[in-house]
Image (cartoon, rainbow, N blue to C red):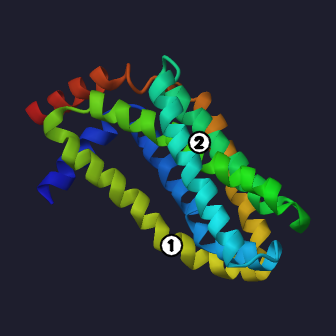
Amino acid sequence: MQDLREGWTYMIAWPGLMGVVVIAMVINFMVVPAALIPLVVTQEYHGSVMQLGMVDSFFGIGIIIGGLVLSAWGGFKKRILTSMVGIIGIGIGIMIFGLLPSNLFYIALSGIFLLGFMQVMANGPLDAILQAAVDPDMQGRVFSLLGAGASAMQPLSLLVAGPVSDWLGIRTWYMIGGLACIIMAVAGLFIPVIMNIEENRRKGSAEIAQIEIT
């Protein structure tokens, strides 16, 4: 509990970090029901095991190519911008796959590819920001809290997504999830404390030192 309290104090004293945590939690809530993909393939695209295998393959290929591109390119100079663009891409990929007509399954696979590709763009730079900026002795606490917050959304998301999909249709959840990702990322682009999260790190450390002295 002491470690958790120290990690929480560290996070709230760092402008922008809590905003990133909230964005991560909301996105996990909206995107986690990827468990619904088999239902989309069978019910909406009238596919079978072969089509589901293709979905998994295109997602994996997207992650591999995304990793290669990010390694070669390095992302934008402001790493948080790369993450936000990645989140927007995730939203677009979700909407492409979830909303195309049933006879366009093979085009919908491009949405799955984009989802995997952009997932690397969103997560890679963010991990780099935290690993480079968070004090080494606080990294375990901060990453544990981030992981706990994101993971807490998974069962809650599945609990909500099932009834909502039964009520409004599976495609509706994909539309809502995709739009949520896009809106959250675009909003983040206009929030200075989030876009300047790396620069604001020193201020956060100073405030923490003052709290500890007090």
Q: Residues within 10 Å of mark 1 (few under 14, many from 20)?
A: few
Give whichever of discs 2 and 1 has the lower sequence position.
Answer: 2
Residue 149 location (% of width, % of height): 39, 58
The residue where tag 1 is placed is 156
Q: Give me the residue at 47% from left, 65% from top.
A: 153
Q: Regarding mark 2 in the picture, which secondary structure is present there?
A: helix
Q: Regarding mark 1 in the picture, which secondary structure is present there?
A: helix
Q: Closer to us: mark 2 or mark 1?
A: 2
Q: Is residue 66 left or right of residue 137?
A: right
Q: Give me the residue at 20% from left, 47% from top.
A: 140
Q: Give me the residue at 72% from left, 51% from top.
A: 111
The quadrant in which the N terminus is found is bottom left
The residue where tag 2 is placed is 118
Q: CA distance from mark 2 to mark 1?
A: 24 Å
**C-beta proximity under 8 Å, tags 2 and 1:** no
Q: Is residue 34 above or below residue 80?
A: below
Work out whether residue 12 or residue 37 is closer to the camera in this orientation and state it.
37
The quadrant in which the C terminus is found is top left
The residue type indicated by label 2 comes to: Met
